[in-house]
Amino acid sequence: MSTSRLSLFFFYAILIILVNPTINAQRDPRVLHECSTTGNVTSNSTLRENLNTLISTLSSNTQIDYGFYNFTAGEGTNKVYATGLCRADLSPTDCRSCVNMSAHELLQLCPTQKEGVMWYMNCTARYSNNSIFGVMETKPTRALTSGVVSNLTEFNAVLKPLFRDLRFRASAGGIFRKIAVGTAYYKSDNYTIYGLMQCSPDLLEMDCSNCLVEAQSSFQDCCSKYSGVRILAPSCNLRIEREQFYGSTLVESPPSLSPPPLPPPPTKGTFPKRTSSELFFYISIISYTLDNY
C-alpha cells in the first residue's frame, strides 16, 4: 500500500471515530440477555416503531445524573416501557454510554419479541409492552461465576452477615438509588470479599428486599462455592469478588467517633428550643426514672 493510500486510510478511520464515538466504546465481553417467549411482533408494527423510538431516546436526558432511566412511548396496546439502570459509581456520561449500547444491542438480539432484558457489567437495559415501573421481577435470573473456594463452610458463614447487611442497606435506599457495598474477611484463603447489592430504585423497600432474598436463594442454589459471582435479575442484582470492582464513591465513610457539639447556652430569660428527638430523649429519661423509683 502506498504512503498516500495509507494516510488516506488512517484519515477516514479517525474521521469515523470522531463522527460516531460510540463505535469506539468498549462492549462488555460478558454480556447476558433474555428475550421473552410470549408474544411476538412484526418489525414494521406500531409497537416496534414505538420501541425503536423509545430505545433511541432512553439515555438522551442529560439532566438525569443518578443512573436510572425510565420512559414510555405510544398509547393503548402499542405502549412500550423501558428502563436503564447503572451501577451508582458510574459517571453520568459512562452510564448513558452503557445504557445506550446495551439497549440497542438488546433490540438487535430480540428483533420480534415484546419483552427483553440485557445485562452488561455496569448496567442493565430492559423493555416491555407491560408496565415495569415499580414492579418487582426476579425472572429470568442468570448467573456468572469464577474461581472456587477451599472452605465452603467458612465461606458461606462469612457471607451470611455480609449479605444481610447489604440487603438491609440497599433496600432502605431512597427513590434515586438503592445500592450497598461492603466487605468481609475470608480467613481460609486469606483475602477480603467485596460485595454489592442493588435494586431498581423505583421499587418499594419491601420489594427490593424480597428481590435480593431471591437473588441470595439463587446464589445458594447454583454458586455458593465460587469466589466470584454475579446473580442477575431484571429488578436487582448481587455480586461478590476477590478484588474491589466498584468505585470509592460507593464506600461509605465510617461514622464520626467524636461527640456532637453542645448546643449554645440559652439566652437569659428564655427557654431553649428543643427538637423532637431531644424531647423524646428527655421524656424517656423521666419515664425510666419513674419506673425505677
Image (tube, grey):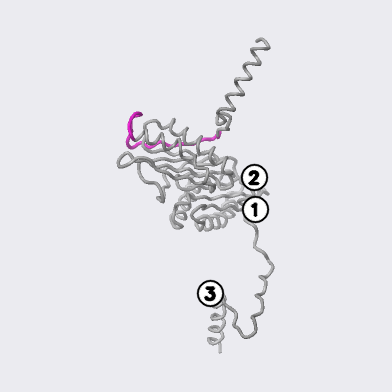
Verify CB contact (< 8 Å) between mark 3 and mark 1. no
Residue 36 in the image, given as x and y percentages of width and height: 38, 37
Q: Is residue 264 magenta?
A: no
Q: Is residue 30 left or right of residue 5?
A: left
Residue 44, quarter of the rendered image: top left
Residue 174 in the image, given as x and y percentages of width and height: 50, 56
Identify the residue at horizontal 68%, vertical 12% (top origin). Answer: 3
In this rendering, the label closer to the viewer, 1 or 2: 2
Question: For mark 2, what is the residue?
Answer: 243
The alpha-carbon separation of the residues under discs 3 and 1 comes to 40 Å
| Residues drawn in magenta | 28-46
Residue 102 in the image, given as x and y percentages of width and height: 49, 36
Q: Is residue 164 above or below residue 280?
A: above
Query: Considering the numbered disc 2 on the image, is that residue within a helix, a strand or a loop?
Result: loop
Which comes sooner in the sequence, label 1 or label 2?
A: 1
Question: For mark 1, what is the residue?
Answer: 185
| Nearest the eye: 210 or 7 | 7
Q: Is residue 272 above or below residue 238?
A: below
Question: For mark 3, what is the residue?
Answer: 276
Residue type at numbered disc 2: Glu
Label 2 packing within 10 angstroms: few (<14), some (14-19), many (20+): few
Query: Considering the numbered disc 3 on the image, is that residue within a helix, a strand or a loop?
Result: helix
Number of numbered discs:
3
**Quarter of the image that includes the C terminus:** bottom right
Query: Considering the numbered disc 1 on the image, is that residue within a helix, a strand or a loop?
Result: strand
Label 1 packing within 10 angstroms: few (<14), some (14-19), many (20+): some
The alpha-carbon separation of the residues under discs 3 and 2 comes to 44 Å
Q: Is residue 32 magenta?
A: yes
